[in-house]
Image: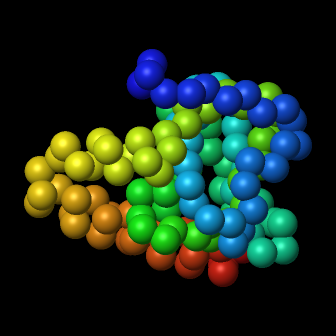
């Protein structure tokens, strides 16, 4: 992942908002990110080694939650174009399976958000 951009966020920085176009996928190198529901309630906190923003891999993906840095956070960022280039080199069978898993994750997150 050394070829991808690394972005650092300060505590309280909003990384993206629910409803934004999904144009980047994030892998947390350091720190904790809070995923926020419609009322800005914390629906999940994720840390080092975890990812968020998977909708960037889906055509026309829209953010289902907001993301905010809990403290200082460093993330490896993969843009939609970079993700599409990665998928273009993958087996044709892998792409629909991957997209189905992302949709399942998105539905899971939506349900979790409704319970909070």
Residue at point 27%, 49% (across, down): 87
- Identified at 44% across, 22% down, the residue is 3
Considering every residue shown, the one lying at the far top of the view is 2
- Looking at this view, name the residue that lies furthest to the right: 12
Asked where in the image residue 2 lies, by quadrant, the reply is top left
Q: Is residue 111 visible?
A: yes
Query: In what quadrant of the picture does the N terminus appear?
Result: top left
Q: Position of residue 107 (x, y in %)?
A: 47, 76
* Displayed quadrant of residue 115: bottom right
Residue occupying image coordinates x 84% and y 66%? 40
Relative to 85, residue 53 above or below:
below
- Residue 112 as seen in the image, left or right of residue 108: right
Count of residue discs: 0
Q: Is residue 85 left or right of residue 81?
A: left
The image quadrant of residue 47 is top right
Q: Is residue 100 above or below residue 86?
A: below
On the image, the x and y values in percent for residue 59 come to 42, 68
Instruction: Determine whether 29 is above or below 42 in the image.
Output: above
* Left or right: 67 as drawn, with respect to 95: right
Expressed as whole percent of the image width and height from the top left, the position of residue 103 reads 40, 71
Up/down of 45 relative to 62, above or below: above
- Please name the colour scheme applied to the rendered image: rainbow
Residue sitting at x 56%, y 78%: 111
Q: Quadrant of the C terminus?
A: bottom right
Q: Is residue 36 shown to the viewer in this render?
A: no
């Amino acid at each position: 992942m050394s070829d991808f951009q690394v972005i650092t966020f300060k505590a309280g920085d909003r990384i993206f908002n629910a409803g934004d176009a999904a144009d980047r996928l994030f892998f947390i190198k350091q720190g904790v990110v809070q995923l926020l529901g419609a009322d800005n309630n914390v629906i999940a906190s994720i840390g080092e080694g975890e990812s968020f923003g998977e909708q960037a891999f889906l055509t026309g993906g829209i953010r289902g939650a907001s993301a905010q840095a809990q403290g200082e956070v460093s993330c490896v960022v993969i843009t939609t174009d970079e993700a599409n280039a990665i998928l273009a080199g993958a087996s044709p069978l892998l792409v629909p399976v991957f997209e189905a898993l992302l949709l399942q994750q998105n539905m899971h997150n939506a349900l979790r958000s409704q319970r909070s």
